[in-house]
Amino acid sequence: MATGNFASIVDQVKLDVLPKDPAVANAAKRKEITRTFITDTISVPTEEMYAYATLATLGDDVYHEPSTLALEAHIATLTGKEAALFMTSGSASNQIALRTHLTQPPYSVLCDHRAHIHKYEAGGTAFHSGAAVLPIIPSNTHHLTLQDVKDNIILGDDIHFAPTEVVALENTLNGTIIPQTEVVAISNYVRSVGVKMHLDGARIWHVAAETNTSIKELCDPFDSVSLCFSKGLGAPIGSMLVGPKDFIKKARWLRKLFGGGMRQTGILAASAAYALTHNFPQLPRVHALARRLEAGLEEIGATILSKAETCMIFYDPTPLGTTFDEIADRASALPEPLILGGSRLVIHIQTSDSAVDDFLAMVRQLAEEKKAAGFVKPEGGANGVIRDVYVRRVPK
Ligand SMILES: Cc1ncc(COP(=O)(O)O)c(C=O)c1O
């Protein structure tokens, strides 16, 4: 039964989401991004990236979108794999990869205990694939070794166990790089026992930039790889899953099943292409800035928990007599605020040099105030451990 005329329905439906003055609001956001250390996913498209993206083709990706197909073909070639599939996110890419590899339970996925697929995908590996996860603590505390994998992989048909069907590595992991020789050794062994290798390569770009190793060489030891455009590369949305043709064909089906079949993705594919061309070359500068941040913190006397191998460092300010909360509160009260979480500091292509200078000056000032108030640095510094990448700050 009609409850109004069309004009009144139009009135109910319409919406304007733009801020009052978009130019001012977005300029403020762009400025904020240059001073945000929480993650690299907050980096924003530039005007130039948007301008390029609007020229993309207008196809529907469920029926194969031309710009997206071109991106998929390029990444397949770049990684040395037969095929590629554009995904909404790194989590979707990892989870659909695992779901595609794993077909008949019982089975397990072996990974580092800090792995994104284990800790930060909301239990997706259990939910989507019904897989047990074997989260392994690296014996050297830095990266999984061949021995760690051999010691923990489950093989055979003892019915008490869930045999390992996928070993999933992450590179970078918390900004650290797994030596490629170790990756190759793990892969040679794992594949020799008939188990698949998956790489969460959300930030594999950083490994290539830091070690001058080709993306193909980094991906060769893996059956499937997920690579992200929306983190260090600064595109707004999207990841790519690569692997054998049949694997990607099945993954495309599962992507649709999970509701991840997108439509006019040309604009996203073009943003990713722009990021590959213009933002990837900026990574050495990003890593150099991260090293400068680390050197500054060390000089002030903070403990470095995880070094700036690429774009992240983890630190502990306890030896300075201060806390993450105190630092974050002080940072947000600066005339030009800095946005901080906890132990993790991430540098990205839009981090400004002055943000790093201001952060170091602020920490130095805090340390001096604590010293003046009688704080004495404990013998041996701090013995902090990295608890969590994502800081769950409880609102006051
Ligand atoms: C290593 C790693 N893998 C996967 C993901 C998931 O990516 P997304 O947030 O796009 O789902 C992230 C997110 O930051 C990540 O850091």
Image (cartoon, rainbow, N blue to C red):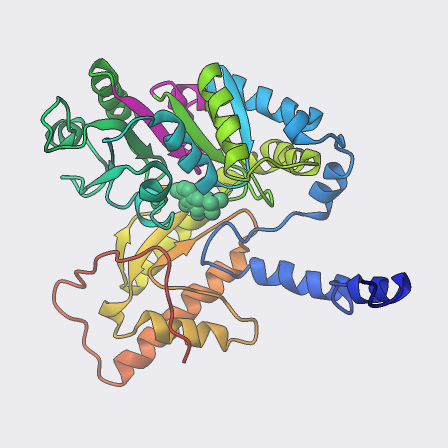
Picture quadrant where residue 53 is located: top right
Viewer-proximal residue, 170 or 313?
Answer: 170
Q: Quadrant of the N terminus?
A: bottom right
Q: Is residue 190 visible?
A: yes
Q: Is residue 321 above or below residue 24?
A: below
Q: Quadrant of ligand 1?
A: top left
Q: Is residue 244 left or right of residue 20?
A: left
Q: Is residue 15 visible?
A: no
Span highlighted in magenta in the image: 195-221
Q: Is residue 173 above or below residue 383?
A: above
Q: Quadrant of the C terminus?
A: bottom left
Viewer-proximal residue, 40 or 321?
Answer: 40
Query: How many circles with numbers are drawn on the protein?
Result: 0
Viewer-proximal residue, 199 or 330?
Answer: 199
Q: Can you give x and y, in whole percent of width and height, for residue 318 in the image?
A: 24, 69
Q: Can you give x and y, in whole percent of width and height, for residue 239 in the image?
A: 52, 36
Q: Residue at the location (37% across, 58% down)?
A: 390
Q: Can you give x and y, in whole percent of width and height, for residue 59 in the image?
A: 73, 30
Q: Is residue 262 above or below residue 327?
A: above
Q: Is residue 113 left or right of residue 48?
A: left
Q: Residue at the location (51% across, 20% down)?
A: 249
Picture quadrant where residue 57 is located: top right
Residue projecting furthest to the bottom = 373
Q: Residue at the location (23% across, 20% down)?
A: 190
Q: Can you give x and y, in whole percent of width and height, for residue 273 in the image?
A: 63, 32
Q: Is residue 64 above or below residue 367?
A: above
Picture quadrant where residue 361 is located: bottom left
Q: Is residue 249 magenta?
A: no
